Image (cartoon, helix red, strand yellow):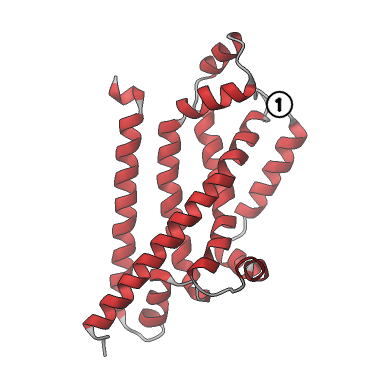
Amino acid sequence: MSLPIDTLITLLKDGLIESLYMTIVSTIIAYVIGIPLGIIVFVTDTGGILKNKPVNFIFGIIINMIRSVPFLILLVAMLPVTRAIVGTTIGSTATIVPLVAAAAPFVARMVESSLKEVSPGVIEAAKAMGASPIQIITRVLLPEAKPSLTVGFTIAISTILGYSAMAGFVGGGGLGAIAINYGYYRYKTDVMLITVALLIVIVQIFQTVGMFTANKIDKRTNN
């Protein structure tokens, strides 16, 4: 028997709010961590403005190790860390901790990839004008890579939304928890289909807004 419509609407509304809360907060924190990491990996790489093989190797290994762990395994492995930070392992706030841990290395690689798209000629011109490494990073690399970074942000936030849905298996809350607890475990196919549809709609909104913004700030498409 399906859930009463008013109960279902309340569940979906609360789940939607929780999913957006987890996704947006996790994405912001992941970028606060991931942008500096991506910059460090890029500038210390071979040919970088601050070439440093040991630093590049260490940060690269750390990023690759965390990225290699499937999210569900990372989620379970970080339960003690999550409990130590937020005092619980259940709920939307607790899910933010493993979401950030999984997303920050992903964001770092996205940032590194975006910076690699910047023309070396632009960097060399900045060097020739006497710009310091910090000035090159803040006034050349990041502004020039802005369209690509925006596309990367769109991909990242959609990926984190998918991670947040998987967190429903361990009491993470949000639409994922509703799909699992009310759709999968109670054999209510309609509930599961509705939650999946909502997740698809959210991803499409993120994708549309992100690509529109990237195209607006891309000088190549506006010239």
Q: Nearer the viewer, residue 105 or 16?
A: 16
User: Does residue 215 sit above or below 153 in this rendering?
Assistant: above
Q: Which residue is mark 1?
A: 51
Tell me if mark 1 has few (under 14), some (14-19) or many (20+) residues whose alpha carbon lies within 10 angstroms of its own: some
Residue 37 x/y as whole percent: 62, 41
* Residue located at (62% from left, 72% from top): 87
Left or right? Give the position of 38 relative to 218: right
Looking at the image, can residue 161 be seen? yes
Left or right: residue 50 versus residue 32 is right
Q: Secondary structure at mark 1?
A: loop
| Quadrant position of the C terminus in the picture | top left
Percent x, y of residue 19: 40, 64
In the image, what residue occupies the spot 37% across and 71% down?
Answer: 15
Say which of 114 and 5 sits in front: 5
Residue 27 higher or lower than 189, as above or below: above
Question: Furthest residue to the right?
Answer: 54
Three-letter amino acid code of the residue under disc 1: Lys
The quarter of the displayed image where residue 90 is located: bottom right
Residue at (34, 62) in percent of width and height: 199
**Which residue is found at the position 46% from the left and 61% from the top?**
22
Q: How many marks?
A: 1
In this view of the protein, can residue 190 be seen by the observer?
Answer: no
Q: The N terminus appears in which quarter of the rendering?
A: bottom left
Above or below for 170 versus 222: below
Q: In the image as oriented, which residue stretches furthest toward the left?
A: 5
The image shows residue 108 at horizontal and vertical percentages of: 57, 43
Image-quadrant location for residue 213: top left
The residue furthest bottom is 1
Residue 14: percent from left, percent from top: 35, 72
Q: Is residue 149 above or below residue 84?
A: above
